[in-house]
Image: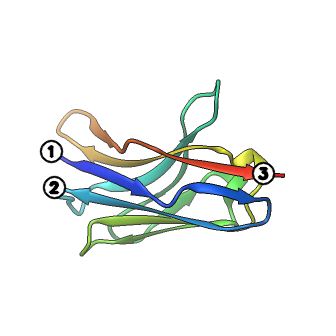
Amino acid sequence: QVQLVESGGGLVQAGGSLRLSCAASGRIGSIDVMGWYRQAPGKQRDLVASITSGGRTSYVDSVKGRFTISRDNAKNTVYLQMNNLKPEDTAVYYCNVRRPTTLTTRDYWGQGTQVTVSS
């Protein structure tokens, strides 16, 4: 079982920065992909960025060049550095661990942290 606890959300003006952290308890394996999703009111939850244990990253186009995901495997922690924030980045941000299993994948989620960007 994996439990995820996010921190670092808050209110910031457009152009500002925030750093989100997600600490995982339980075993995080080398095959697990860690990532950040976000969900704005009335919208679906979408992937923002992900990172493998080997450091391979992936970003949604809208955050490329502004957000950086990183991972500390020794601490079972994933971070999301968000720079040049825009009002459209406002959402609840969720930490995710995606674990491949024999037939499918299993997702673990944090409780979410609110990010609000004012114009």
Q: Which residue is mark 3?
A: 118
Label 2 sits on a secondary structure element that is loop
Task: Describe residue 32's horizontal placement relative to residue 21 as left or right.
Answer: left
In percent of width and height, residue 27 lies at 15, 58
Q: Residue at x 69, y 53 (%)?
A: 61
Question: Alpha carbon of mark 2 to alpha carbon of mark 1: how far?
Answer: 6 Å
Dot placed on the residue nearer the N-terminal end, 3 or 2 = 2
Whole-percent x, y for residue 74 in the image: 24, 75
Along the line of sight, the residue nearer the viewer: 100 or 9? 9
Q: From mark 1 to mark 3, how far is it between C-alphas?
A: 37 Å
Residue at 63% in and 51% down: 60
Name the residue: 33% across, 66% down.
77
Q: Where on the picture, by quarter, is residue 66? A: bottom right
- Give the mark toward the camera: 3 or 2: 3
Measured as percent of width and height from the top left, residue 5 is found at 33, 53
Residue that lies at the very extreme toward the top in this rendered image: 42
Q: In which quarter of the view is residue 55 placed?
A: bottom left
Tag of residue 26: 2
> Foreground: 60 or 3?
3
Q: Earlier in the sequence, mark 1 or mark 3?
A: 1
Callout 3: 10 Å neighbours few (<14), some, many (20+)?
some
Q: Amino acid at mark 3?
A: Ser
Q: Secondary structure at mark 3?
A: strand
Residue 1's disc is 1
The residue located at (20%, 60%) in the rendering is 29
Q: Which amino acid, mark 1? A: Gln
Query: Is residue 28 toward the left or the right of residue 54 in the image?
Result: left
- Indicate the amino acid at tag 2: Gly
- Left or right of 60? Residue 27 is left
| Left or right, residue 24 beside residue 14 | left
User: Do labels 3 and 2 touch, CB within 8 Å?
Assistant: no
